[in-house]
Amino acid sequence: MVELSLILLILVVLAYGLMDFCTAIYEKQVITNLTREGANLSARGSGGSTAQIMTNALAAIIQEATPLNLSTNSTSGRLILTSASNTNNAASGFYISQQLSSGTLAASSKIGTGVGNYAKLPSSIVAQSGHNVYIAEIYYKFNVPASLGKLIRVNVTNQFYDVAYFPGS
């Protein structure tokens, strides 16, 4: 009977750990897909202006984000869409031309903030002079369902981040 209780305890701990791990992988995959889709929607766009295109893309991503909450008043996530323009056909020539966000999670864009400011893009991003690059960033606070990490006092990162870049016209 003692052996059974020890084995059951180990199995329960493994089951809860597996549940936490699988949920984290699932949410990270959803975030990766959403950033790619957000940058793609911004680049392809439907609307008369860059602002309207990005507003439409933001609304579509928020709608597609289920089961994650990335709505305007969400405290567990933040979605940032940025349009960066290349003004002189060089890697140093990208400047933020438009930026929209949703959610109230305390996080700021790693690309940069403020229209007209320099955009920090990877050197592999190349666009013709006058063209835009659309960037989608998502920060999401992962809520551990089983809290096994708290039980065994392991500090686990609970905020995910993902970014995607798409060239536009």
Image (cartoon, grey):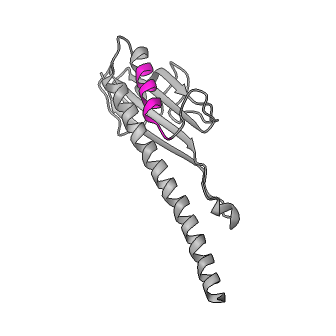
Q: On the picture, is 81 further left or further right than 49?
A: right
Tell me the quarter of the picture where residue 7 sits: bottom right
Residue beneath the point at 54% across and 30% down: 71
* Extent of the magenta region: 54-67
Tell me the quarter of the picture where residue 11 sits: bottom right
Q: Residue 9 appears at what percent x and percent y?
A: 63, 76
Q: Looking at this view, is 134 or 16 the one in front?
A: 16
Q: Residue 54 appears at what percent x and percent y?
A: 42, 21
Q: Looking at this view, is 135 or 129 the one in front?
A: 135
Residue beneath the point at 34% across and 32% down: 166
Residue beneath the point at 29% across and 25% down: 128
Q: On the picture, is 106 further left or further right than 50?
A: right
Tell me if residue 124 can be seen.
Answer: yes
Q: On the picture, is 91 further left or further right than 160?
A: left
Q: Is residue 43 above or below residue 76?
A: above
Quadrant where the image shows the C terminus: top left
Quadrant where the image shows the N terminus: bottom right
Q: On the picture, is 101 further left or further right than 64?
A: right
The total number of labels drawn is 0
Q: Residue 152 appears at what percent x and percent y?
A: 68, 68
Q: Is residue 136 above or below residue 132?
A: below
Quick one: which residue is furthest to the front in this view? 1
Tell me if residue 94 can be seen.
Answer: no
Q: Residue 55 appears at what percent x and percent y?
A: 45, 19
Residue beneath the point at 56% across and 34% down: 78
Is 15 a magenta residue? no
Magenta region, main secondary structure? helix
